[in-house]
Amino acid sequence: MVRGVVDDAKRPVTKPRIPDISKWGDSTIDMCWIGHATVLMNFYGLKLVTDPVLFEHVGASTPFGTIGRKRLVAPAIPADQFPQIDLVLQSHAHMDHFDFASLKKFSKSAPIVTAKETTDLAKEAGFKQITELRWGEKRTIRTNSGDIGLEAFQVNHWGARWKVDSYRGYNGYLLTRGGKTILFGGDTAMCDSFSTLSGRKIEAAIMPIGCYGRGGSHCTPEQSVAMTDACGSPYIIPIHHSTFPIGKEPLDEPMKRLRGTISADRIAITEIGGTWTLPT
C-alpha cells in the first residue's frame, strides 16, 4: 500500500465525462455513475446517492486528511457541485464505500440508511436521521421529496472497517417508489440471494464488476451478469471498477469481460460521468 501511495503521487487524475442532469425531473428515473460505487439517482424527483466517495483519496480518515489510494478518474460531479440530496444509502463500512470526508459534505438533516452495527459511523459523520437495516428488514423512509421503500438483502461480502470490528454488517438494497424497483447490489461476491428476488420485477440493477483479482469477496463480471439475470433485471449499471487502483486485474478488463458476457443494449452506463434514464 505504501508503494502504491508513493506511485499515486506521481500521476495526475484523469478528468471524467461531464454529465448533464439538468433535465432530470419528477416523472423519470435517472442515474449517473459518479465513480467507484457512487451513483447519483433521481427516483421520480427524489435524489439519492449510493456509497458516496467524492474526493481524490480514499482510505483512513486522519486529522491531516484521508490517507490512502488516489483516484484514477475524478468524480463526475465534484462534492461542492452536488445537487441537494434527499437520501444517502450506505452498503457497508469499508473505507472505499463509507468515506467520512464525502459524507460530511451532505446535509445532516438528510436521512441515511446503512447496514447493521454502523450507526456509530453515521453519527460520527454527523447524521441525525439514521436507519440501520439488517437482511430482510424493510422501511419506508420519509424525505423532503417524498417517501421511498428500502429493503436490505443478503450479499456475499464482509463489513469490517478495521480487522477488529468484524461484527459490522453489509447489505444489498431494493429501492421502491412509484411502483418501480431498483436494485443496488453494494459490494458482493457470487451468491444465491439474487435468485430469491426474481419475482420482484426489478427494473435495473446497480452491480459491482471489479476488484475480483483480490480474492473471494468480489464477483467477476460474468458472475455479476449471472446475479443480474437471476434477479430478473433487464439492465445492469456496472460499478466498482476503473476508479481506484485497488484491484489486481488490469483496469480495462472488467468492462471488456462484461461486454463479452451481456448484450450492449443491457449495459446502461459504460463510463464515469455516463447517465441513463429508465425507458418508459
Image (cartoon, rainbow, N blue to C red):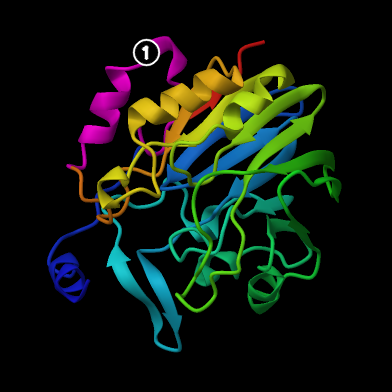
The image quadrant that residue 45 belongs to is top right
Residue name at image x 21 percent, y 71 percent: 5
Q: In this view of the protein, which residue sits in the foreground, 248 or 53?
A: 248
User: Which amino acid is tagged 1?
Assistant: Ala
Residue name at image x 21 percent, y 42 percent: 251
The answer to whether residue 47 shows anywhere in this view is: yes
Q: Which stretch is magenta?
A: 250-274
Most distant residue in the bottom direction = 63
Residue name at image x 45 percent, y 15 percent: 266
Tell me the quadrant of the picture where the N terminus can be found. bottom left
Relative image position of residue 38 (x, y in whole percent)? 50, 48
Q: Is residue 90 above or below residue 268?
A: below
Tell me the quadrant of the picture where the C terminus can be found. top right
Relative image position of residue 81 (x, y in whole percent)? 53, 54
Q: Secondary structure at mark 1?
A: helix
Residue 141 magenta? no
Residue 261 magenta? yes
Is 186 on the left or on the right of 117, as rendered?
A: left
Relative image position of residue 68 (x, y in whole percent)? 32, 71
The image quadrant that residue 66 belongs to is bottom left
Is 168 on the left or on the right of 177, as rendered?
A: left
Residue name at image x 41 percent, y 76 percent: 60
The answer to whether residue 24 shows anywhere in this view is: no
Is 245 on the left or on the right of 59, as rendered?
A: left
Disc 1 target residue: 264
Q: In this view of the protein, which residue sits in the foreground, 210 or 270?
A: 210
